[in-house]
Image (cartoon, grey):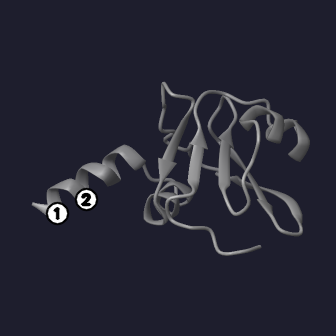
Amino acid sequence: MAQIDADRIFVYGGVVDLRKGADGLRALVGPTEPDVLYIFSNRSRELLKFLSVDATGVWCGTRRLHRSRFAWPESPAGKERLTTAELAWLLAGGDVRKFRQKSRLAAR
């Protein structure tokens, strides 16, 4: 997979049936651009699914937490942009909203 640009990572707000494969997830986001990473979550927030398109095709991956749940950033617009640091924080089980608050406080 190609390198994902920091401003091309999006979480898809809301609950998604993660039994969907790559084509079903792709239909949710509409036309996809190359080298954009889309992240989806199920209702229980214990599983994430990733969708990306590159020059060679589509890939889909998962991340599951066994002892906790992902703190999912809700977005009224349907999708929310993440930085690579926020993505790493989310994948580790952290709350992106708290990460943003800490980042703002540190910038002062």
Q: Report x, y in % for residue 81.
A: 49, 48
Q: Report x, y in % for residue 56.
A: 89, 69
Q: Amino acid at mark 2?
A: Ser
> Quarter-wise, where is residue 1 in the image?
bottom right
From the viewer's perspective, is 61 left or right of 79?
A: right
Residue at (65%, 32%) from the top-left corner? 44
Give yes or no for contact between labels 1 and 2 (Cβ–Cβ under 8 Å): yes
Q: Decide: is 89 above or below 71.
A: below
Q: Most extreme residue toward the left, as rendered?
A: 108
Label 1: state its secondary structure: helix
Label 2: state its secondary structure: helix
Residues 82 and 95: in front is: 82
Residues 96 and 47: in front is: 96
Residue denoted by label 1: 106
> Quarter-wise, where is residue 99 in the image?
bottom left
**Disc 2: CA contacts within 10 A as few (<14), some (14-19) or many (>=20):** few
> Quarter-wise, where is residue 85 in the image?
bottom left
